């Protein structure tokens, strides 16, 4: 009995069932006990527990799954280790919003109760994104799922913190930090996102204490003048050299402050006089330290003015600015106001304007850690793909600043430090004692938690069992490949390399593949505010996970950004349907008892498709080895759709009819099954569901496709001469088909074809495979010769070294066809003339975007080619 697939491929009916079967059969689990297989490991960039799958996740995890499924089929011990990130600020914000709806706050709840509430939220909602990744087809070993706050990772974090502290690489001090008034926590430099903002530059007069005119200071933030402790000028600025050492009066506040000289002042900015506010500006902080000035903090943690702000105490920074400027204007101390473009820092989580703020924080000294991390990239022990991202890595590492790692949050890894309430001694230990070792006094634990990225930096080795030690660590570290977005090269990639070298003595991975960013069809970032996001779960519901995965790979060329619209997923769906229909047709002709699966190379078409399969198997493997996912799927698409489905299946249709000679039929079906099986293996990493479903119906299958084997190209089955012959034959068939279509010859009509060629190869192909050409192009009479003349009223074409003639007399109404072609030519010529005039317009060429001009030029070339073709067809009818 023949094997029947459903008439149409239905991903909704297949995907959940297939994934459940993989899970039920425990195919994702990796057993490292005594395996002689080569280890291959990817650790997932842990998504936030607050997260919902977005298109960036879909792209990132599809790429990882492709690599892992490929290496698994290739015989490696392939581990994709999953997990989630506790996402300190994000998760705390989510739970605080829930509390607010209940009329509660974390402060009222208390720290211990709040932490329990967050854990309860995490247990209920935190695995949602894991389930969503499963819908994508992610083949992670879920039995190894880790969480950045689980006990093992917490131990690793404490060991790293204490180790770095004892080496003098972690310290605590009062410094200017990036402060989010909304989240009430410090942020590292790379957690601040800068936005170009149209602001103002206020020029304010600071009168001399002796009654003189004083100086005019330019500032973008007048509210911070309440914390001014000096005015600085450049030591070589002759305009103000006489004022250095004098005092001026701080307007409104009426406090006297000195005029100092410091070379950091930019003489060309504003008036060349700069207010020094050490508690509210990082440059001023350093200038204050150089000049022995005491900082004056005038803001509360929520960015309202504190008591040091005098009459402005309690006002927001915005209200203070407005009121202070009004008072300066009233006192005639506001000299002028200019429009000013300013780059303003915002919190990467809540978008609040960040405040430079003086506070006591914990820091990591980065320069000593950065040097070896740069060296392993220079020595190619860690390679970025594409390599252009190395420059961005080095630019940041060479100018690295100390990392502020403390956060004023309650959700996260507590800093393993405490201060004695008696003598003030600081204790840093993995397990804090109850009493001070110096005086026996009670220890007060540090209330802060660590930056989320601190624990993430340890991800490649902490997830594998460090510091306890584990077989996974021995087998899988260093890991093989990291797949990530360029946006976290600083946040995560660089810090993992530094941590891996410091604590494991080895780089954490061999390759870093940086993929592009998903943009909308207009090239804009997808965001809630623009409403231009595409929900991958909706795409899966509508098109299927395979269609989404395949389409993303078709669009991801060279790690470039991807301009995406929902209709782009149709290409993946159409391809899945094409594969399904080809498999359905072939399986309907294969007995369920099985047929031979070893290919035959006796027949020309069989020999050709087997040879082409060796080529695509080799090129797909090479593309994956080079992380060229686009080349891999493009090659598979072309081979599967064009060569296998459109050509080979058509070639063998006459040979697999029931009335066909049994041995010929068996050879064709065996070859088709061999190639189809190979296609399924090659496509599986990209389209795991549809390939597994078809595989399950093959009579020759053994077990699941997911754990089968990767095709290895055979040099003995490759025949380039056959491929060259077939390429020429296909060109001739396409030429005849094009003529038939252009001249409106009915599909049912047989045609006569004459071919003139002096090329030995063309003659050999026609001699050997003329019958095949006749069947494919519906040719009744075929003749060829070196001196063949063009018959009257014959359409013609030139293919390689052959001229193709198709006599049309008796097939079509010549006069009517000439009239139709002439009308079409007139229309195309009119369009061509309009396009030529447009491109001759110098204003258009000079002012239009370059890509528009290039597109119009390409359109002109196409129109010109069409006109030339139509002219030749008309001429052939007149011959």
Image: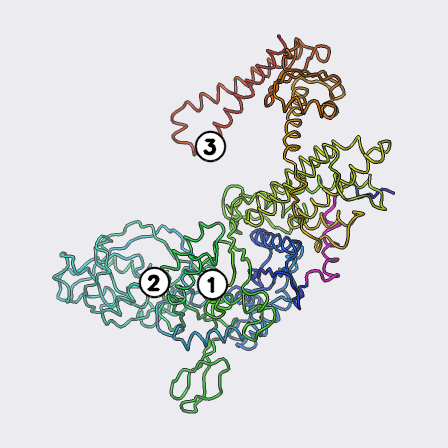
Please tell me which residue is depicted at 70% across the width and 22% down the height of the picture. Answer: 767
Residue 13 drawn in magenta: yes
Q: Nearer the viewer, residue 89 or 798?
A: 798
Specify the label residue 852 is tagged with: 3
Provide the residue span drawn in magenta: 9-28
Q: Indicate the position of residue 521 as horizontal and vertical percent values.
A: 54, 42
Give the alpha-carbon distance from disc 2 to disc 1, as whole Å.
45 Å
- Residue 118 position (above or below residue 439): above
Observer-nearest of 416 and 595: 595
Q: Which mark is residue 320?
A: 2
Q: Which of disc 2 and disc 3 is earlier in sequence?
A: 2
Q: Is residue 734 magenta?
A: no
Q: Residue at x 36, y 60 (%)?
A: 399
Of the numbered discs 2 and 1, the one sitting upstream in the chain is 2
The location of residue 614, given as percent across then percent down, is 65, 42
Which picture quadrant has residue 644?
top right
| Label located before the other in sequence (1 or 3) | 1
Q: Is residue 582 above or below residue 753?
A: below
Image depth: mark 1 or mark 3 in front? 1
Q: Residue at image x 26%, y 68%?
A: 288
| CB-based contact (under 8 Å), mark 1 and mark 3 | no
What is the spatial separation of the Cα atoms under label 1 and label 3, in whole angstroms? 43 Å
**Secondary element at image label 2:** helix
Residue furthest out toward the bottom: 440
Q: Residue 90: give its label.
A: none
Taking depth in this image into account, of 195 and 446 the one nearest to the observer is: 446
Observer able to see residue 266 = yes
Indicate which disc residue 497 carries.
1
Towards the viewer: 326 or 651: 651
Residue 714 point in image, percent of width and height: 66, 44
How far apart are the alpha carbons under marks 3 and 2?
50 Å
Quadrant of the snapshot with the C terminus: top right
């Amino acid at each position: 009995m023949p094997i029947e697939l459903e008439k149409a491929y239905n991903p909704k009916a297949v995907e959940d069932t297939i994934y459940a079967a993989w899970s039920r059969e425990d195919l994702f689990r990796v057993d490292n006990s005594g395996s002689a297989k080569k280890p291959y490991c990817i650790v997932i960039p842990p998504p936030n527990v607050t997260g919902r799958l977005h298109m960036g996740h879909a792209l990132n995890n599809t790429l990882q799954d492709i690599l892992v499924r490929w290496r698994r089929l290739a015989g490696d011990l392939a581990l994709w280790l999953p997990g989630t990130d506790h996402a300190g600020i994000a998760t705390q914000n989510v739970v605080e919003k829930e509390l607010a709806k209940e009329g509660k706050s974390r402060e009222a709840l208390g720290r211990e109760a709040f932490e329990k509430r967050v854990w309860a939220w995490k247990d209920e909602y935190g695995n949602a994104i894991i389930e969503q990744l499963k819908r994508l087809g992610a083949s992670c070993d879920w039995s190894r799922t880790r969480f950045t706050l689980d006990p093992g990772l917490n131990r690793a974090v404490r060991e790293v913190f204490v180790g770095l502290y004892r080496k003098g690489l972690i310290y605590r001090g009062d410094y200017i930090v990036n402060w989010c008034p909304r989240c009430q926590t410090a942020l590292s430099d790379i957690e601040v996102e800068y936005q170009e903002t149209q602001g103002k530059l206020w020029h304010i007069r600071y009168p001399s204490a002796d009654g003189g005119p004083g100086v005019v200071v330019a500032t973008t933030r007048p509210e911070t003048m309440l914390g001014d402790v000096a005015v600085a000028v450049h030591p070589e600025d002759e305009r103000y050299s006489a004022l250095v050492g004098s005092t001026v009066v701080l307007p409104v506040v009426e406090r006297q402050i000195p005029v100092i000289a410091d070379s950091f002042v930019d003489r060309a900015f504003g008036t060349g006089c700069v207010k020094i506010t050490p508690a509210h500006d990082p440059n001023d902080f350093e200038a204050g330290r150089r000049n022995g000035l005491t900082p004056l903090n005038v803001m509360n943690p929520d960015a309202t003015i504190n008591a040091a702000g005098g009459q402005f105490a309690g006002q927001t920074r915005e209200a203070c600015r407005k009121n202070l400027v009004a008072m300066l204007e009233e006192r005639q101390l506001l000299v002028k106001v200019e429009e000013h473009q300013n780059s303003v820092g915002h919190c990467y989580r809540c978008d609040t304007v960040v405040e430079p703020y003086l506070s006591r924080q914990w820091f990591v000294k980065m320069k000593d850690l950065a040097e070896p991390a740069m060296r392993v990239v220079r020595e190619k022990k860690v390679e970025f793909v594409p390599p252009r991202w190395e420059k961005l890595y080095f630019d940041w590492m060479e100018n690295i600043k100390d990392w502020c790692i403390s956060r004023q949050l309650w959700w996260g890894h507590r800093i393993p430090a405490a201060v004695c309430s008696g003598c003030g001694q600081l204790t840093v230990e993995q397990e804090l004692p109850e009493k001070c070792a110096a005086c026996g006094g009670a220890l007060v634990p540090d209330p802060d938690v660590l930056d989320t990225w601190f624990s993430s930096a340890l991800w490649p080795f902490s997830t594998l069992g460090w510091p306890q030690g584990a077989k996974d660590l021995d087998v899988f570290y260093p890991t093989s490949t990291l797949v990530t977005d360029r946006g976290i090269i600083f946040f995560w990639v660089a810090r993992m390399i530094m941590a891996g070298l410091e604590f494991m003595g080895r780089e954490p991975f061999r390759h870093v593949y940086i993929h592009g960013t998903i943009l909308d069809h207009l090239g804009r970032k997808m965001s809630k505010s623009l409403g231009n996001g595409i929900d991958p779960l909706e795409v899966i519901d509508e098109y299927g996970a395979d269609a989404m995965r395949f389409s993303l790979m078709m669009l991801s060329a060279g790690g470039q950004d991807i301009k995406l619209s929902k209709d782009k997923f149709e290409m993946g769906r159409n391809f899945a349907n094409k594969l399904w229909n080809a498999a359905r047709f072939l399986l309907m002709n294969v007995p369920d008892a099985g047929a031979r699966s070893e290919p035959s190379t006796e027949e020309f078409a069989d020999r050709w498709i087997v040879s082409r399969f060796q080529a695509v198997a080799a090129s797909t493997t090479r593309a994956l080895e080079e992380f060229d996912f686009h080349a891999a799927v493009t090659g598979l698409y072309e081979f599967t759709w064009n060569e296998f489905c459109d050509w080979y299946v058509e070639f063998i249709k006459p040979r697999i009819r029931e009335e066909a000679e049994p041995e010929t039929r068996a050879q064709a079906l065996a070859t088709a099954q061999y190639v189809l099986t190979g296609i399924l293996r090659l496509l599986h990493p990209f389209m795991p569901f549809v390939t597994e479903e078809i595989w399950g119906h093959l009579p020759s299958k053994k077990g699941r496709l997911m754990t089968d084997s990767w095709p290895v190209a055979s040099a003995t089955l490759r025949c380039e001469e056959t491929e060259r012959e077939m390429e020429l034959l296909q060109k001739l068939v396409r030429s005849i088909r094009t003529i038939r279509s252009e001249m409106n010859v009915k599909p049912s009509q047989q045609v006569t074809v004459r071919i003139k060629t002096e090329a030995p190869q063309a003659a050999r192909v026609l001699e050997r495979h003329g019958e095949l050409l006749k069947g494919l192009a519906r040719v009744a009479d075929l003749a060829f010769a070196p001196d063949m003349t063009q018959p009257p009223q014959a359409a013609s074409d030139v293919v390689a070294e052959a001229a193709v003639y198709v006599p049309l007399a008796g097939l079509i109404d010549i006069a009517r066809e000439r009239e139709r072609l002439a009308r079409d030519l007139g229309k195309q010529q009119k369009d061509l003339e309009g396009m030529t005039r447009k491109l001759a317009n110098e204003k258009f060429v000079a002012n239009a975007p370059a890509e528009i001009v290039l597109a119009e030029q390409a359109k002109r070339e196409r129109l010109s080619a069409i006109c030339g073709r139509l002219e030749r067809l008309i001429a052939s009818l007149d011959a």
